[in-house]
Amino acid sequence: MSKRSIHNFIVYIPDEKCYGVTENLGAFTSLVKYNKDGIEFKVTLLNEDIIFLEDIAIGIEEEEI
């Protein structure tokens, strides 16, 4: 059994002028969750359209090989 750490990133979304957290990081796009005006959004954004600020480890996932 192998282990891998699960990382999310705190990001800034210039078009929305708010901060969010990546839920799924891809090579070109990422699923980002953020709140604006009390409404929660989950959207896929191009990585070039967001600013990655901080890496946050949220746990360890065990995988069977």
Image (cartoon, rainbow, N blue to C red):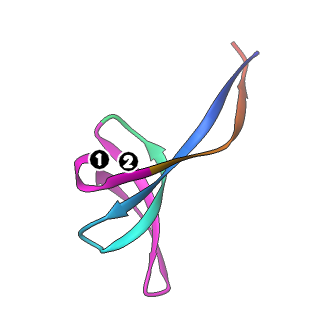
- Quadrant housing residue 37: bottom left
* Magenta stretch: dominant secondary structure: strand
x and y, in percent, of residue 46 in the image: 26, 50
Q: Earlier in the sequence, mark 2 or mark 1?
A: 2
Residue position marked by numbered label 2 in the rendering:
30
Report the magenta residues as a range: 28-53
- The amino acid at mark 2 is Ser
Query: Height in image: 40 above or below 62?
Result: below
- Cβ atoms under marks 2 and 1 closer than 8 Å: yes
x and y, in percent, of residue 62 in the image: 74, 27
What is the distance, in whole Å, between disc 2 and disc 1 at their CAs? Answer: 6 Å
x and y, in percent, of residue 45 in the image: 30, 54
Q: The C terminus appears in which quarter of the rendering?
A: top right
Instruction: Using a 10 Å C-alpha cutoff, classify the residue at mark 1 as few (fewer than 14 neighbours), some (14 to 19) or many (20 or more).
Output: some
Q: Is residue 17 magenta?
A: no
Instruction: Using a 10 Å C-alpha cutoff, classify the residue at mark 2 as few (fewer than 14 neighbours), some (14 to 19) or many (20 or more).
Output: some
Left or right of 58? Residue 15 is left
Q: In the image, what residue occupies the spot 37% across and 73% down?
A: 18
Return the residue found at the far bottom. Answer: 37
Residue position marked by numbered label 1 in the rendering:
47
